Amino acid sequence: MAWKTVDRVSQPASDSPGLSEPLKDKIRGFFDRYPTKRAALIPALHMIQDDHGYIGWRAMDEVAELLEITASDVFDTVSFYSHFWTHPRGKKVVMVCRSISCDLLGADDVLSECKRVMGIDEHETSADGSYSLMTEECLATCDHGPCMVVNEKLHKCVSPSQVEKILNDADNDVLDVPRSDLYDGAERNQG
Amino acid sequence: MNEYEPILLRNVGKPNVRQLDAYRATGGYEGAVRALAHTPDEVIDVVKRANLRGRGGAGFPAGVKWSFLPKERDITYLCVNADESEPPTFSNRVLMEEDPHQLLEGILIAGYATQATVAYLYMRAEFAEQFHIMQKALDEAYHAGYFGKNILNSGYDLECYIHRGAGAYVCGEETGLIESLEGKRGWPRIKPPFPAIQGAFGKPTVVNNVETLANLPHIIQRGADWFMGIGPEGSSGPKLFCISGAVNKPGCYEWSMDITVRDLIEDDRFGGGMRDGLKVKAVMPGGISMGILTADELDMKMDFSDPANYGLLGLGTSSAIVIDEHTDIRKVLRNVARFYAHESCGQCTQCREGTSWMYKIANRVERGLGRAEDIELLGQIPSKMGMMPGLSICGLSDGATFAIRTIVEKFRSELEGYVGSVDDEVVRIALEIAN
């Protein structure tokens, strides 16, 4: 197997969105929390992903400049964490827990039903861009397995027969608790 | 079993307890007020005398950990480990969801005792709802003067920030957490230097688990002797136990550490017995990393010392997954092996390769393509990869080791029945096609 490296020729940075001024301001707002600017990277990446849906090459270049680190430092971090996407994802991301408790309680069937309803496989995005499907390690809700998450919203004790209803519900990602906008991007509240 | 009055979960189900006023009405923040009236050394002394052992898994005494900080220091960081990602553990989630101010009060007390300047609450990214709950509670606590400058006119300053992770099990290891906090990959560091000397941003740092800190307000208010009086010697204080799997009442329960695994499964105050009258086949009682028990080993006590008598790594997170008689042990083996293969950070060769190797073997055993020597191999690999033989930077590989090795040792005859039935050549061709 050969090493796969980033192909910057076929994926020009200019094709992906850069950081808006309000977003840069929001990231700068994290600077006084940490003694180094680099420490604001993970919060910044969350905010970028909230605005853009993913973290593209141009955003990585620009956040590197903002935090006074190299673009490779940024990619080093981005590539380590499973929640960061380097390519566009669906409007909603569905994550089905696959760890031991959920697995023994039937997570496989929930996942299969998700695949059937969405018409996609794991790590894929539906043709209309509405959903991406993932599996996730333990969501720390083992007492309510099997569970799945739609964006931020956790659905507990999911049976395969409920999957279609959950996915067709427009409000399936709305939380029951008041949200904090601290880690949101700059665009979320602009409509 | 004695009666037990809940301490950590005492506010569960009370109305509006996520709000500051309701929390204060239950005596909330009185422990912090009392702590601030003493010197930091006095607070450390009480916690040391109480022998509060870390609830995150390793069981190291919190007060002793604090006293490793150098005497002369200008900046100290407190990191709160809320990266709870050990399957099947969810007690930190319950603590943050149900009683966020209890944790914040614990952070304030620990911050004061260690003279921390900044506390970072590191929460795993999957905790979305819990992040919003904690952030709202933190905003309220700031507003009421429990964080910030000159807290309650004591002259002590403490900033507290929530730092969200981005999906990596290894960030629950304290130096992995620190690296992640600094904006890097969550790669654990070689120790020494330990975080108390050189931790976050190169400064003295204390990393404590959520449940450990939630105990502090009560220790300060009720004293070390009260704490020592709960549960057996060496395992004192309130403890949260999680139970999930094939039981009637999966959930998070609080008790002293004098219950057995059997109590946790069968007692009506906990798991409430097996679902549908099923029999127990196996239990992983401390999170999967501690190892597995057979149905004959349910008398193990859920304290800090007894698990070693059953070949387990330790008490861990005291969270049990109960596996019923109809579950194929190969499914358990494969799931557990996959977890570590996915979550190994890749720094240490033997962990990166070993976990993936074990997953490949477990995978083919589950598919009925196991070779006769595979079980022997699965027993051998774990002996050559952990921190215990001194090879790995962090304990992740030890967790993988204990999980896989105990499954193979304790369910060997069952596993052996599944392998070697297919001709080696057929296996080779089948695997070639499958891969």
Image (spheres, rainbow, N blue to C red):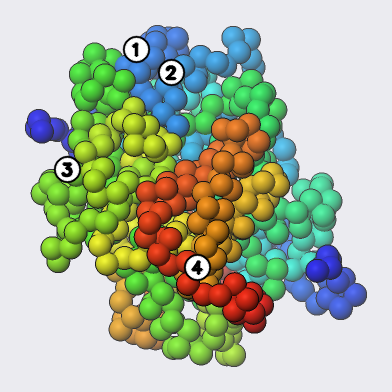
Please state the chain letter of the residue tagged with numbered disc 4 in the rendered image.
B
Residue under pointer 2 = B63
Residue B80, relative to residue B327: is it above or below? above
Q: Locate residue B97, reporting x and y percent.
A: 33, 49
> For residue B304, what is the image quadrant?
top left
**Disc 4 element:** loop
Spatial separation of the CA atoms under disc 2 and disc 1: 8 Å
**On-image quarter of the N terminus of chain A:** bottom right
Residue under pointer 1 = B49
**On-image quarter of the C terminus of chain A:** bottom right
- Name the residue type under label 2: Gly
Q: Earlier in the sequence, mark 2 or mark 3?
A: 2
* Most foreground residue, B7 or B20: B7
Q: Residue at x 30, y 77 (%)?
A: A159
Residue under pointer 4 = B420
Q: Badge 4: few (under 14), some or many (20 or more) residues near its Cα, within 10 Å?
A: some
* Most foreground residue, B183 or B25: B183
Q: Earlier in the sequence, mark 2 or mark 1?
A: 1
Q: Earlier in the sequence, mark 2 or mark 4?
A: 2
Evaluate if marks 4 and 3 touch, with contact meaning CB atoms under 8 Å apart: no
Q: Locate residue B7, reporting x and y percent.
A: 22, 33
